[in-house]
Image (cartoon, rainbow, N blue to C red):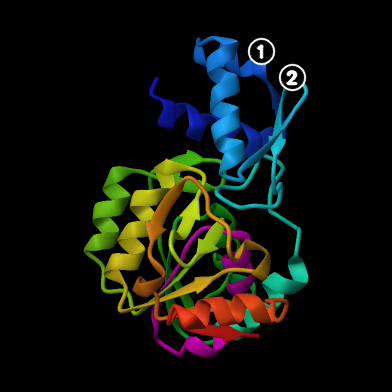
Amino acid sequence: MSALKRHERIMEILISHQEVTVSQLSEMMNVTGKTIREDLAKLEDMGLLTRVHGGAVLAQNDQYGILSGQGTNTKHMPEKAEIAERALRYIQPNDIIALDGGSTTLEIAKRLPSFPLTVVTNDLFILSELAKREQVRLVVPGGERTRNMLISSQAVEYVRGLNIHKAFVSSTALHPEFGLSIYTGDLVPFKKALVETAQHVYGVVDHQKFGQFALWTFATCQQLDMIITDSGLSTEQVAHFQQSNIPLDIA
């Protein structure tokens, strides 16, 4: 297993369990404890985890790549609600929209107005939320279930063949240089397909994720029409992103 694959696997385990020991990782990946400790040091240098005695914990346990087995992410709900309300301003009757997987996009789904819409999504929680909406036409690219997501190479090609007006994408982290990034590489092709296919792309990212970066970048900031965030964003971060000519819509 390559170092990059080990790093991805370590982060997936931490997302699910919040903490892990060197011995557990060594056994899972069939490598020495020395190799695991070197991996953990590199990931700590990136700000993705914190090393503790005998193992590591997730640096920001509310960060979002794919949801843990415990269900939806309930942290920072006021911020996510603010972003969702703001995002609704960009949605019009008869739009074809894509809702990427995520707790913030789930909040958008919960608040969608009662008018005709076509919604493309691979998130099972969003599907469950919208299945009861008679005026919403659901388009599900399909794939194998990975926690709350449906993922497959066929789904990526399917999305690339669609005419999507607006895509709302979530991210674990947002950085002027490294763009929008997540911990889990298997979601990257689907997210890239949404970004590259949609006529308009909106990042929905709460302020805690600004200035951060994770393992895998799926979009640059310049690929987005707008980054929608909550009112908690600091003036320093606003200035930093504005200096990079990155459009922000702050709730």
| Type of amino acid under label 1 | Ser
> Residue at the location (75% across, 64% down)?
76
Label 2: state its secondary structure.
loop
User: Can residue 135 be seen?
Assistant: no
Label drawn at residue 23: 1
Image quarter for residue 217? bottom left
Q: Is residue 189 above or below residue 13?
A: below
2 and 1 marks in contact (CB < 8 Å): yes
| Type of amino acid under label 2 | Gly
Is 193 inside the magenta-drawn segment? no
Look at mark 2 in the image and give the residue it sits on: 54
Image quarter for residue 40? top right
**Which quadrant, please, contains the C terminus?**
bottom right
Q: What span is colored magenta in the figure?
A: 88-108
> Residue at the location (58% across, 63% down)?
211
Q: Residues within 10 Å of mark 2 (few under 14, many from 20)?
A: few
x and y, in percent, of residue 88 in the image? 56, 84
